[in-house]
Image (tube, grey):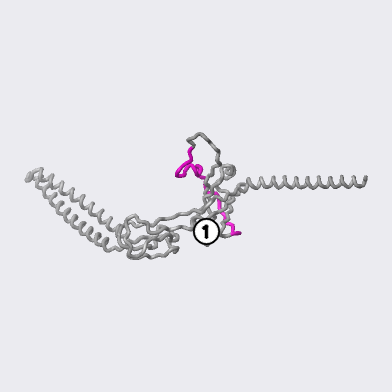
Amino acid sequence: MAEEKTGNEQKKKKAFMIVGVIVVIGLTLGYFYNGYRKTHVSTDDAFIHGDIHTISARVSGNVKAVLVTDNQRVKQGDSLVEIDPVDYRSKVGAAKANLELQRATLRLAESDRKRAKALYEQDASSAERYDKAVATYEISVAQVKLAEEQLRQAELNLGYTTVVAPANGYVTKKSVETGNQVQTGQPLMALVDLDNLYVVANYKENQMENIRPGQEVTMTVDSFPGKVFKGKVDSIMAGTGVSFSLFPAENATGNYVKVVQRIPVKIVFQEGADKDHLLRIGMSVVPTVLAK
């Protein structure tokens, strides 16, 4: 009986030791995990953003040629669409002819003004005639300036018949085809700049304690499991996301339930992090800020 009692006590001691070891391990893991969470702040509410240039027509007319295809990469200054320039060339010609006419009228008005001035100084003409000649000359000067501006605008409109890329990027949402009649301001396509993508991560307000601009960030995307993209915190928005929403939350009834708000944080990629242009606007991202 004594031996059996001693065996039970030994088993109890072992059990207590095992439980104690488990508790110590759990507390240790909890301590390190809590420290990890403070220095590695992560969220799954994050998406890739970028510059999207809406390409629109600056003049109306018939589309003569579409020089790009969907998803084609173009460089800044490349021609995208050509609008039939015939009418605009004609307007440039008419503006040039009008400018020559106004310049000829100005030369005649200047001669009349000089002649009227000489006669007036010799008391051979009235002051009224001289004033009229001066007024005619000033009107001709103004008409020449107006004709010059009209010519400049006509030449600009002629240049606008060739729609060019405002930046490097990829053609998307192309909605124009050869033969279409387009109007001024009508969107023709969009241009996405994949060289300057960034992430907007919506962190909970209780995660913002240690996040600061300049901190390193590691990011993963569902499309490329196992691949890690590096970046850094660029800036923190000056308000919560709901503060700038189209319909901000209101509490007119007086019943208040506290909801943890989210603050958008802009994260930029390291140079060369996406040199193969694998990422696309709108992709979901899981960023982890190394808040050391």
Image coords of residue 160 (percent x, y): 32, 59
Pick the front one: 165 or 139: 165
Query: Is the residue 272 above or below the residue 135 in the image?
Result: below
What kind of residue is marked 1? Leu
Q: Please give the range of residues in magenta.
A: 225-250
Is 80 one of the magenta-colored residues?
no
Of all residues, the one furthest to the left in this rendering is 124
Q: Is mark 1 on a helix, strand or loop?
A: loop
Which residue is located at x 34 percent, y 54 percent?
Answer: 185
For this rendering, which residue is in front, 1 or 39?
1
Question: In the image, residue 15 lies at what x, y percent?
Answer: 81, 47
| Residue 195 spot, x, y in % from top left | 49, 58
- Residue at the image point whose x is 71% and y is 47% from the top: 29
> Is residue 242 on the magenta stretch?
yes
Is residue 235 depicted above or below 76 in this figure?
A: above
| Residue 78 spot, x, y in % from top left | 39, 62
Q: Which of 205 and 16 is in front in this view?
A: 16
Q: Nearer the viewer, residue 29 or 2?
A: 2
Q: Name the residue under label 1.
A: 279
